Image: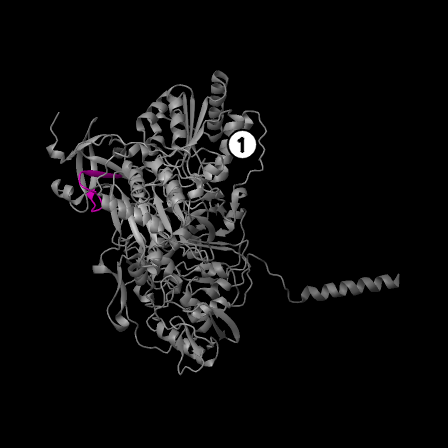
Amino acid sequence: MFEGIKAMAQGLGSTFKALGAPRDTIEYPEKRREYSPRFRGKHMLAKDADGHELCVGCGLCEAVCPAHAIRVVAAEAEEGKAVSWTNRYAVDYEVDLIRCIFCGMCEEACPTNAVRLTPFNELAASDRLDMIADKEELLHPPVRK
Amino acid sequence: MIRLTIDGQEVTVPEGTMIVDAAARLGIDVPVYCYHQALGPLGACRMCLVQVEKMPKLVTGCTTAVTEGMVVHTQGEAVEKGRKGVLEFLLINHPLDCPVCDKGGECYLQDYTFEYGPGRGRFQEPKIQKVKNGPINDLVLIDQERCVLCQRCVRFMGEYVGEPHLLLEGRGVETVVTTVEHQPATSQFTGNVIDLCPVGALLSAPYYHKGRPWNIERHSTICPHCPVGCSSLATTRESHIIRMEGRPVPDRDWGWLCDRGRFGYDFGYHPERITDSWVQQKTTSAAQATRDVAEWMQRTLTQYGSGSIGFVLGGHFTAEEAHLLRRFAHDVAHTDHIAMVRDVKGYLPLSLNGTFEDVAQADAVIFVGVDPYEAVPVVHLKLRDRLHHFPQLQVMGVGPRRLTRETMPGQDYLIDAEDEAIFFAKALASRLPNDSRVQALIASIQDYSLPVSDADLEVFGQKLLDAQHLTLLWDGENSDMATVLSVLADVRENPTAVLPTFGPVNWRGYEQAGIDPQYAAVEDLLTKVRNGDIHMLVLWGADLLREFPDRKLAQQALEKADYVVSAQVVPPLDMPYIDALLPVATWGEVEGTYVNMEGRLSIGAAGVQPPGQARPTRSYVVNWARLFRQEWQDDAWDVFDNAEGDVLIRADAAVASEITLTRPATKPADGVWTVIQGAWVVENGLPSEILEPRETEFVGRISPDDAARLQIGAEGGYVQAQTSEGSVLIAVRPDPAIMEHTLWIPRGSRHDWAQHLEGVLTLMRPEEVPSV
């Protein structure tokens, strides 16, 4: 019996010890964790200072993507209605966030520094289709709270 | 033969071979921009520098012919330094805009820079700005900044095609490739410069910014627009064909395409493309339409018994589909009335059919009624290639219009189409008066006089017999020519080859599938429909009113038939008579075999999905068989069974047993207009939106003298044609190839007026027409 009490005290001892110790979990979503500044989350498409898209639809991100998560369709901009800084732009730019492995190769391959991985990592949806980020969505990156 | 050593390996090549080609035999790749085997050496780009022992400096491998015992090094410090320097210079004014360049990923400038080039340039000064994305014409764009001045395009157009629409302008670093007087290039071979350009300077306008090498698929196929069936590659992306490229076949074909073939691939997405089933004025579901047609077939069969349904094949179907249809007709629809729509009466037996090798070997070429430039453009290029290597090539044209041209100079014998066979027969008779075969040939036309002098006949006859390798191109207009050609091949000692230029494009494939290719077969079938012996007409791709020359018979047959079912890609002219219009899958959507004008089998790949309700022929056939409660089983037929390699096996030529020629009807008096027809690849077959800027409304042609009289400018105009049945407004333009008082119209034209020109009496200006 003495053995039993000793074991229980030992067990409770570690419980009480841990009770006062600093915690690893946080109270999400009230509190959010700090990540490294180089954390790779959801993609965004950047614009230049004039508001022109940096992406020219070259498709290098598509070529380099190991998960085949990116689809780019380029087109020629109408005269006087430039979308990007040159006459070629991406009509469609889709990232399948379910397929994406967030390796950041697209960011690395991008010759115009248009694709960037933001720290935003709160990716959830109730429909698979909602997990395909289209161009409009990528041009307006969500801000992490 | 010459022996030399390249990179330590010995190779034996024929005299005159360039170092780059000798290296290629060993599988050693020497980088090169300006050199192309078809165009010959130039040495403009300096990319192919190699080291030859005992030569003081690096030499260009593409302009240096091999010599006995030569020792060549394509690797090594000196060569690498040379290449690096050349590339650095080439890149000095290059915009380095690969991300927006369509060539990115398939560009030799990228590849060679990556492999041999310097990591970075030392040029700090501002780059020279030139024209970007300027037009060569509506189909080809030029980016002069990206150009490396290899001159392939300029030389191709100038030397190879013989239409120098491109040139170099300016000097030094300011040199640019541009068009003559900055006017759009009008040649029908301009698209080839896109394939030829090793960098991203010449681009396809319809493909502009549409794809990248990693997001497209390339399907090995053939071009479906004319009987040449050029080997090509169809680029598809997301189930759309977005580009056609030439596909060179080693030792046989350079992979040239004409603009019709290169840019006319979009008929599958044409706004007129039929995507819905249409039964008795109403669109319906595919299943319902199939059921309705099956019911009509069953009804016709129960009422009239076997042989009451007629099938006419046309269009661009594969040999396999033709075979399926023939089997369906025989086994399920219980009829042997199956024919193919023909627009001319001639038929060429396979034994006489030559290949393009006969063009490459020919020392004499005769165009019988056909201008290859217009009917089979790539054959014109093959002839140009021959002319390049063999300038003594004798070119002769026999037909109702001039058939030779500036780029294919020769002698024309202006003979009415119905006299062509007689002309050949008489020419032969003038040299071989005692030959029994020739005597039989001219027996019935001995006293028929031709508008040609006896001296001309003798000269022509002598040429026919003297030619070492005679190749004829025949448009099939004069059906007696087949007899004459078989006799000609028989009396000549040297090879004689004939290339038929008539359609449907895959007629030889249909023939292999067991469908009678004779004009008489389809004529007989339609006559039976008209006479009420056949009650239901199934037109598989055939558009009778457009393609069948006897318009009256076609119309009467269409009116008489109880049911007319038509499977089409775009709405036919037969539309008012059709009870059920079925959307059918076509070239690019179904894989199968095509047999071209040389009897060569090629596989056309399926790259895209048929749109809407369009279904493959097979699907219809199997469905109908099921509705007839018949099990459909594939049989063991294969079109390659009858082929040696990829060419159909020729039986020994046999001279036709009946060698008499028909006597043409008496000629109309002078001053009356004659209407002649010819194949023109731009006007035939399937519509294309991309090619619309190239198309002209003024498809009729008259002589320049007549045009001047009718006050029609070079670009064309409208005239009123008085015919025996009334008057019709037609669109014509002047063409020096056309004789006076002759109206040329393209065969199978999409223009409705072209079908109403029987018995043209005269042409006059619209305002001169007397009011009724």
Q: Quadrant of residue B31?
A: bottom left
Determine whether the residue tagged by mark 1 lies in a helix, strand or loop: helix
Q: Does the magenta-highlighted stretch encompass residue B736? A: yes
> Is residue B373 visible to us here?
no
In this rendering, position of residue B375 left or right of residue B631: left
Which residue is rendered at x = 34% and y = 48% of the image?
B465
Q: What residue does disc 1 label?
A: B622
Q: Which residues are magenta?
A: B733-745
- Which residue in the rendered view is the most extreme toward the right? A1
Dot 1 crowding, Cα within 10 Å, few <14, some 14–19, many 20+ = some
Compared to B205, does B62 lie above or below?
Answer: below
Q: Which amino acid, by three-letter code, is at mark 1?
A: Val
> Circle 1 marks a residue in which chain?
B
The residue lying toward the viewer, choosing from B455 and A2, is B455
Q: Position of residue B526 (x, y in %)?
A: 38, 25
Compared to B97, does B281 lie above or below?
Answer: above
Q: Position of residue B308 (x, y in %)?
A: 46, 21
